[in-house]
Amino acid sequence: MTVQTQAGEARIADPIQMEVFSNRLLAIAEDMGQILIRSSFSSNIKERRDCSTAIFDASGRLVSQADHIPIHLGAMIGAVDAILARYSLDQMKPGDAFIANDPYLAGGSHLPDISIITPVHQDGKVRFFAGNIAHHADVGGKSPGSTSGVSRSIFEEGIRLPVIRIARSGEIDEDLLELIAHNTRDPEERLLDLRTQVGTNMRGAAMLVQLIERMGWANVEQAIEDILTYTSRRLKNRIAALPDGSYTFERSMDDDGFPGDPVPIVCTATIAGEDLSFDFAGSGPMARGAINLPDSALKASVYYCVKAVLDPGLMPNQGIIDPLGITAPEGTIVNPRAPAAVAARAVTSNRLCGAVFGALYQAFPAEQGMASCNDSTSAVSVSGWHSVRNATYVYPESMGGGAGAFSDRDGMDAVHVHTVNSTNLPAEALELEYPILLEEYCLVPDSGGAGRHRGGMGMARQLRIRQDNTSFSCRSDAHIIPAPGLAGGKPSNVTRIRRNPDSDREEVLHSKASGLTLMAGEVIRVETLGAGGFGDPSERPLDLLARDLREGKVGRTAAERDYGRAMVDAALLLG
């Protein structure tokens, strides 16, 4: 067992074995992820990689997570907790697998994210749980894509799955599988992807059993304790190095899913020695629309922020979770009551991360701070009839924006930030699989906030519809409130979603527009916001400003507004 010091603190028994074992577990989790991606049928998993994998011990503690989608971590933790609350380990048989997705019944984050959790038996006992989660393009409900921002309750958002045994002794429950699949708009995709999820865990379980038999259970058990001890101690050391105090930062949603007043998200981070807690008192009331953030998504967002700001190299396991305190008032946008809608929770998760980042960075020296990122995700769902497959298709896509500038460098352009980490669907795959044409995919000029260092730029994606009666919905934010700068840096632009841009039929859409019917030839253009700049714009090096002008990242009019005509003229002389 883990050795105790005279002061009673746990000490790692074998650091070398711990490090080797940790990387073995991570390799298994990563291998599971690659199997899931390569074997899936839907483009959202195989191309956009909107999925995650993780390994838990028999008591439900996270011991390893692959580097995929941070917000998925909370849903898998919630699913494992729900399984253990409902079933004893003795009730689980080799080859069993459980399915879950519901935020209120099974610790999920929203209904399209379906978790499959498989107990791993060795020597007649449950030693681990192999877990994976995948975002399914549609799980039923009122709107195609099951992620409408204007849903008013979870009952509008799709099929709800509490913890259910989907496989028994290695045999999938075909009746249950058919029931789930045929409550969605594309049953073939659901059937194939869910089978792949079950099979992925079977492969992961086999690799875990091989690891136990090679090392021996006693050594594996010891290595797990050492990993968690090390991670927890390393995080506490990082916390203890920061000055004690309470630090508060606020970001706001444009509205609550329907036009109206902004909704604040307030984070107060309190550091006391090696203890770190987060309180979201002051955040706005539960939203009318689907941007409420359920408990599992709130926690996953905070875990990600702590790792990203305090120690990016920290191993993602229970050692990050246990030292943290998280409280949020019930009935608020960050802790909703059932049956509040949560389909568009990723938008709120990213805005909440912006508040957590802003609070934590106040405990750092000013030169180590980071301006606000786009703190959002702009996502669309396009659906219609697929004449080749003779089925309804649903095409989901989420788009990033700018990352915040630092004191010594510009922010990154056109990236996902925070808890969304999927890739884009390549143009070739998009146009091959769906009756949609990708007309433009580019950076948005003048979108990053000016400063000594410029905020990252947003991105644009323009789609032309090729078939009548195509359904379109979007869910985004920051159409009104930009990303603020830091230390004198300027704010970003804002997001715009336009129907038939630059034509006499142009229509600027609300951030949560839902259920629009598009005809062949119509165009949708999404332009996302950039990020905040860092430092006084007058301090920007002329060669960097000249490069921005030369590359078209900043136009002359915007440059003169933010940097002054004299600086622009001097930069243009540099070529």
Image (tube, helix red, strand yellow):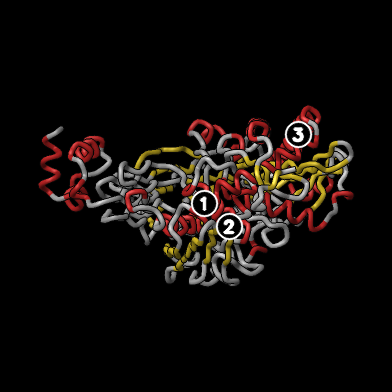
- Residues at marks 1 and 2 touching, judged by CB atoms closer than 8 Å: yes
Q: Amino acid at mark 2?
A: Leu
**Disc 2, SS:** strand
Gap in Å between the C-alphas at discs 2 and 3?
A: 29 Å
Q: Within 10 angstroms of label 2, few (less than 14), some, or many (20 or more) residues?
A: some
Structural crowding at the residue carrying mark 1, measured as other residues with C-alpha within 10 Å and reported as few (<14), some (14–19) or many (≥20): many
Task: Pick whichever of labels 1 and 2 is earlier in the sequence.
Answer: 1
Q: Position of residue 107 (x, y in %)?
A: 69, 57
Say which residue appears at 22% left-offset and 52% top-offset. 536
Residue underneath mark 3: 208
Circle 1/circle 3 CB separation < 8 Å: no
Residue 498 in view: no
On-image quarter of the C terminus = top left
Question: Which residue is disc 2 drawn over?
Answer: 324
Find disc 1 in the rendering and name its residue.
306
Q: Please state which amino acid type lies under the numbered disc 3.
A: Leu
Q: Nearer the viewer, residue 330 or 458?
A: 330
Task: Please determine whether, in this image, residue 245 is positioned above or below residue 415.
Answer: below
Q: Amino acid at mark 1?
A: Val
In the image, residue 439 above or below residue 148: above
The residue mark sitting in front, 2 or 3, is 2
Q: Quadrant of residue 494?
A: bottom left
